[in-house]
Image (cartoon, rainbow, N blue to C red):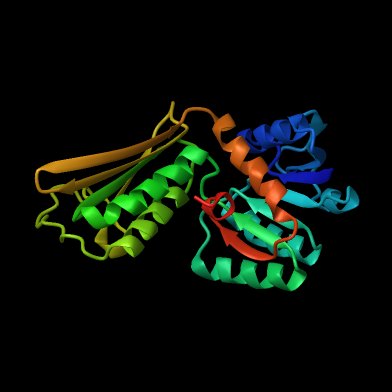
Amino acid sequence: MLRIGVFGAGGRMGATVCEAVAADPELELVAAVDPNRAGAAAGGAVAVADRQAVVDARADVVVDFTVAEAARDNLVWLAGQRIHAVVGTTGFADEDLARFDAVFAGAERACIIAPNFAISAVLMMRFAELAAPYFDTAEVIELHHDAKIDAPSGTARLTVEKMAAASGDWAPDPTEHEMLPGVRGAEGSAGIRVHAVRMRGMVAHHEVIFGAEGQTLTIRQDSTDRSSFMPGVLAAVKAASGRSGLVVGLDALLDI
């Protein structure tokens, strides 16, 4: 049985992870850590402030759903403790990923980072990648709850990167005058425009709109509850053993 710790256990995502781990007969929740919410209930456990708890409990894998600033330090520390990491935190730069790859490979442990653990989101990205060569215009819209502090989402960024890698032949933006600054969104890889919405009542939603002469294609994914992420989180936790170094994206584990 794999022994699991959770960082960010007092938050909504962290608490949901704790509940999912506790309900899985192949896993054991041995430590819930959240320095900002010590004492909070999390999947039958009580969150503590000190991350040393995962070492004391001999955790095999730690799931991190914190924020980028905290996770940068947490992940290097976990590699030093020779503990696998599964990460739902977003907002990392390329240099962060290179550092995680180096320290986890050196520790012979895995660091699995997925911008989105929903299987539907992984499929959405794959479908967008497949469609990209057949269209010459595309835009990406991501919509999230109003507590998400980074924009655009890691899922939107990765989707655009996959589309740009699949096709470099995109028509230029025809806009010459923005009557409101920023109205055309941000320019991602290959000039593909990305738009971010932050709104109460949302969880996580992504839409890719493709256009070519006389036709359009819309690919949309919706997570209406945080439980949608749990099958992917648990799959990543179980896949971590036997791997080392950085793995980015759930598709690498699911062969999608």
Which residue is more in the foreground, 252 or 80?
A: 252
* 256 is higher (above) or lower (below) than 94: above
Please indicate whether residue 119 sits to the left or right of residue 168 in the image. right
Q: Does 70 appear above or below 207?
A: below
- Identify the residue at image location x=20%, y=53%: 135
In the picture, measured across the screen, residue 125 lies left or right of residue 96, that is left
- Residue under the point 44% across and 43% down: 123
Q: Quick one: which residue is furthest to the front in this view?
A: 255
The quarter holding residue 141 reads top left
Residue at position x 55%, y 56% in the image: 252
Q: Quadrant of residue 98?
A: bottom right
Can you see residue 88? yes
Q: Closest to the observer: 170 or 93?
A: 170
Residue 6 drawn above or below residue 24: below
In percent of width and height, residue 95 lies at 54, 71
Q: Position of residue 101 (x, y in %)?
A: 63, 69
Residue lying furthest right? 56
In this rendering, the answer to whether 100 lies above or below 18 is below
Residue 64 showing in the rendered view: no
| Residue 46 placement: quadrant | top right
The residue shown at (56%, 49%) is 254
The quadrant of the image that shows the N terminus is: top right
